[in-house]
Amino acid sequence: MWIYLFMALAAGAVLPLQAGLNAQLALSAGHALWAACASFAIGLLLLLAVCLTVRLPRPVWGDLAAMPFWQWSGGLMGAFFVTAMVMLSPRLGAATMLGMVLVGQMTAAALIDHFGLAGFTPHALSIGRAVGIALLIAGGIIVRLY
């Protein structure tokens, strides 16, 4: 379990660096959308190489084609997220941008858990979770102000 917690921390730790590097890429590429395209292309190439190297069984294309349209929306959300980070990081700074991202993530996560959306097991929105989200909102405001 600890390895998963550390992996989650590491994934969170690279977000501000990724946002800054992609913002620099946007300067060279001429636009945030080109930077997002390049970022996704590099990620795609790396993931394809890893999948081929570890010799995972290939997906059944018919099964993929039969999936409901909403199951493909994660890629759309990823494209929106990366593009937003590229555009927002130079304007807001890393701390404010990620503070607001964290508030949005935790608020959405609490609602997703509460209603059991997207295949998650329902977990009621408790007073403790609500207070935690309120503290995150306050923290986001404080980071923005100072």
Image: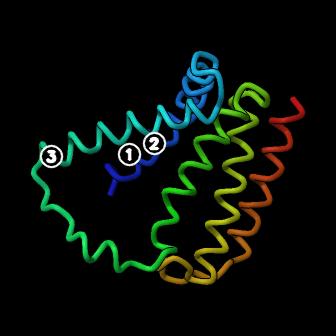
Residue beneath label 2, please?
11
Counting residues from the start of the chain, the first of labels 1 and 3 encountered is: 1
Q: Amino acid at mark 2?
A: Ala
Q: Nearer the viewer, mark 3 or mark 2?
A: 3
Label 2 packing within 10 angstroms: few (<14), some (14-19), many (20+): few
Task: Tell me which residue sits at (29%, 43%) in the image.
Answer: 47
Q: What is the distance, in whole Å, between disc 3 and disc 2 at their CAs?
A: 23 Å
**Relative to 57, residue 62 above or below:** below
Residue 7 is tagged as 1
Residue lying furthest right in this view?
A: 145
Front position in the image: 5 or 63: 63
Contact between marks 2 and 1 (CB within 8 A): the answer is: yes
Snapshot quadrant of residue 139: top right
Q: Picture coordinates of residue 56 (x, y %)?
A: 14, 56
Q: Is 104 left or right of 138, judged from the image as shown? A: left
Q: Is 95 left or right of 54, judged from the image as shown? A: right
Q: What is the distance, in whole Å, between disc 1 and disc 3 at their CAs?
A: 23 Å
Mark 2 element type: helix
Task: Tell me which residue sits at (85%, 39%) in the image.
Answer: 142
Snapshot quadrant of residue 89: top right
Residue beneath label 3, please?
52
Q: Amino acid at mark 1?
A: Met
Label 1 packing within 10 angstroms: few (<14), some (14-19), many (20+): few
Q: Amino acid at mark 3?
A: Leu
Q: Picture coordinates of residue 81 (x, y %)?
A: 61, 47
Front position in the image: 16 or 8: 16
Q: Picture coordinates of residue 122 (x, y %)?
A: 54, 83
Which quadrant would the N terminus be assigned to in this image? bottom left
Counting residues from the start of the chain, the first of labels 3 and 2 encountered is: 2
Mark 3 element type: helix
Residue lying furthest left in this view?
A: 55
Which quadrant would the C terminus be assigned to in this image? top right
